[in-house]
Amino acid sequence: MDLFYVLLILLVTTRAFGELAERVGQPSLVGELIAGITLGAGIAEFPDTFPDLINLAENEVFVSVTDLGMFFLMLFAGLEMQPHKVIQHSAGALVVAIGGMVVPLALGVGLGWMFLPHTDNRVAQCLFIGTALAITAVPATVRILMDLGKLETTVGQTIVSAAVFDDIFSLLLLAWLTGLIAVGEPPIGIDIALLLGKTVLFFVVTGIVGLYLFPWGGRLMRHLKAQELEISAMLVGAFAFAVLAEMLGLHFIVGAFVAGLYFGRKTINAKSYERVKTTMSAMTFGFLAPIFFASIGLSLNLGALSGAPLFVGLLVLLAFLGKVVGAGGAARLFGFSTRESATIGIGMSPRGAVELVIAGIALKAGLFENGGAPSPIVENLFSAVVIMAVVTTVISPIILQRAFSRQGTDNK
Amino acid sequence: MDLFYVLLILLVTTRAFGELAERVGQPSLVGELIAGITLGAGIAEFPDTFPDLINLAENEVFVSVTDLGMFFLMLFAGLEMQPHKVIQHSAGALVVAIGGMVVPLALGVGLGWMFLPHTDNRVAQCLFIGTALAITAVPATVRILMDLGKLETTVGQTIVSAAVFDDIFSLLLLAWLTGLIAVGEPPIGIDIALLLGKTVLFFVVTGIVGLYLFPWGGRLMRHLKAQELEISAMLVGAFAFAVLAEMLGLHFIVGAFVAGLYFGRKTINAKSYERVKTTMSAMTFGFLAPIFFASIGLSLNLGALSGAPLFVGLLVLLAFLGKVVGAGGAARLFGFSTRESATIGIGMSPRGAVELVIAGIALKAGLFENGGAPSPIVENLFSAVVIMAVVTTVISPIILQRAFSRQGTDNK
């Protein structure tokens, strides 16, 4: 793969489609996803014309670039948000996250139970569908709220915090699911307790480092001479938190986000902070994020549409319904207005990021092998989940755009 | 390899050593190279402690990151320089480049002729040593001049332009050399003429695009709505020029540099231009360039020091002598003062970047196989060239720092 060629094609296409999306009143993200889908369709049609663009998802270099894209996006989201506001909204977010996990999980398991043939893998497959519906894609959610300028509203903060909680819960689910696939039985309570303990440890360590070491580093930097140290310092903090998150069984995006949260206006002087934000915004929205979202669009494989159309349709429907009823319902109970609750439900609906990672893990673990009984559903399960992930990520911002422009009461 | 872990370790180490270098009055670059050398020595001593850091030079993902580092560095150098000044100094630069190629080439071939045993590979090996001495590492040279704040002086502009010419000439040499290795005979005139024709084509196409399409794109962008389009536009231009350069047999850094040259203050409005420069400076000096220079230091293998100490000593000596006499002598003839000429000679001396690529190509082509006659020189030739590349890159900025601080007459 010639990296520069791939980056050239993807950057031109995503930025052009992003501009078109803005022209018709949609967030750029929608354009970038559609750019990826269009390129994917073009490559499938004329594989000889784009040899460098085939199987990008399996190319280690390209995956690293999209990982960097997720990393920059989450770090920038953390930078934009204020920790005290995140904590202030954390009770509501926790309730929303739990509601937004449990309902889709149950719907997914139920859907699987109805459609899947009786095999040894059936329980694990049902649980996989449930997990696939329970997930929320934090990077996609963050980007949508940024595109709409709603990240710092109460609804926006609740959505992002709930999505981060969701991300952590989904790792618990994934651990449970992979245990089930590997040994045929779900892991016992002690494994779950261990993962929970590691999660707590992560937040304690990052909290101490963020509250005490970051400001100390900021004061130290005033006495240093090397140029462009501020951005290095922030990246070092974020890389360290990302590595720690991975060591403790969490996804690296949680580490990047938390590092951004702690790296605040008070860590370094105001002028340097603005320079860092300018740089991060340009690199994220002008370079890495479009490449990342194009990669989600590129992963779309429409095979399941002809093989199991009813199942795919129901899966997409339940993807929205589960989050609107589960997360939105929990938000309504917590005191948000009906319109705000629906907005939160839709805001939690995008699946395209972590979903593709988890579907990949399940694929490698042999979850989609059928043990003799031929079933169009099982054969198309992977493709169906990818369709659901991409469709929810494309449609959610379009609905949210309307929802936010109508209410307009929440611009605090 | 866990990319975030590797980036964390390299970024912390390079920035710390860079700060130490500044403290003792040296450019950051020297510290970054020494950070790489130190890490390399640490890894060799305790391989089990750093499993992720072993053989980074062979890791495709890491090489892509360092390629991006070279790309950003050359693009930023182009941005900083003004095309009319580059053209103004191009006659002098061409003379300096030719002098700085011919003399080291002759010295290298002579050194090889003295030390190497009589085998079938001898001619090619001598020519390889000559090529290794004739090269100038543009990215290293550019970084040194930036660290010293001398990029836009007459001497600085002459060094960079001559280094770019050198880079193009060295590709001609390399084509000749690989032809010699492959078929045992140097390629005939038509191949050389073809490469020259492609080089001319590259500059004609980039000239037309840079002079007409870039300003048109700048005017178009005023009417577009998507955010952070300026940096995307610049990256698209630079990726396109890099891909074109590779298609026409040139190194991608030439494309990145030329794109930066044409993307000037007048292409987009002044405020956006400053934002782009802020971003490029932060990403280059705060993130990607230190990683790239650490990778040069990491590649150091001291094996040849014990196996062929005299040869290594002479090689390093001739590396400086060849450029000071060749490039410096040509500069003196062209009208620079003696001190300025010596400065230009030293400024052309760093080899660490393209050198390592070329040594790698020669290694893969089987140039260091000896055909029966055991020779400590041939066995250590690869390692000797790498030592020469790293030593010239570390020492040149230290000498240049003194040279520039003494003259101080050339700060135009």
Image (tube, coloured by chain):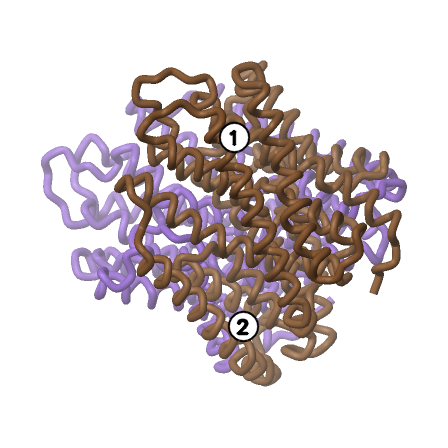
Chain colours: A brown, B purple
Q: Report the residue marked by disc 1.
A: B249
Identify the subunit bearing mark 2: B
Residue B210 x %, y % = 75, 38
Q: Residue at x 41, y 59 (%)?
A: B5
Look at the image and tell me in which quarter the C terminus of chain A lies: bottom right
Q: CA distance from mark 1 to mark 2?
A: 35 Å
Q: Amino acid at mark 1?
A: Gly
Depth order, front residue of A264/B120: A264
- Residue B332, by quadrant, is bottom right
Q: Which mark is residue A109?
A: none
Depth order, front residue of A209/B11: A209
Q: Report the residue marked by disc 2.
A: B401
Circle 1: element type:
loop
Residue A25 x %, y % = 85, 38
Packing grade of label 2 (10 A; few <14, some 14-19, many >=20) is some
Q: Is residue B282 left or right of residue B291?
A: right
Q: Residue at x 25, y 60 (%)?
A: B302
Q: Earlier in the sequence, mark 1 or mark 2?
A: 1
Whether residue B65 is visible here, answered yes or no, is: yes
Q: Amino acid at mark 2?
A: Gln
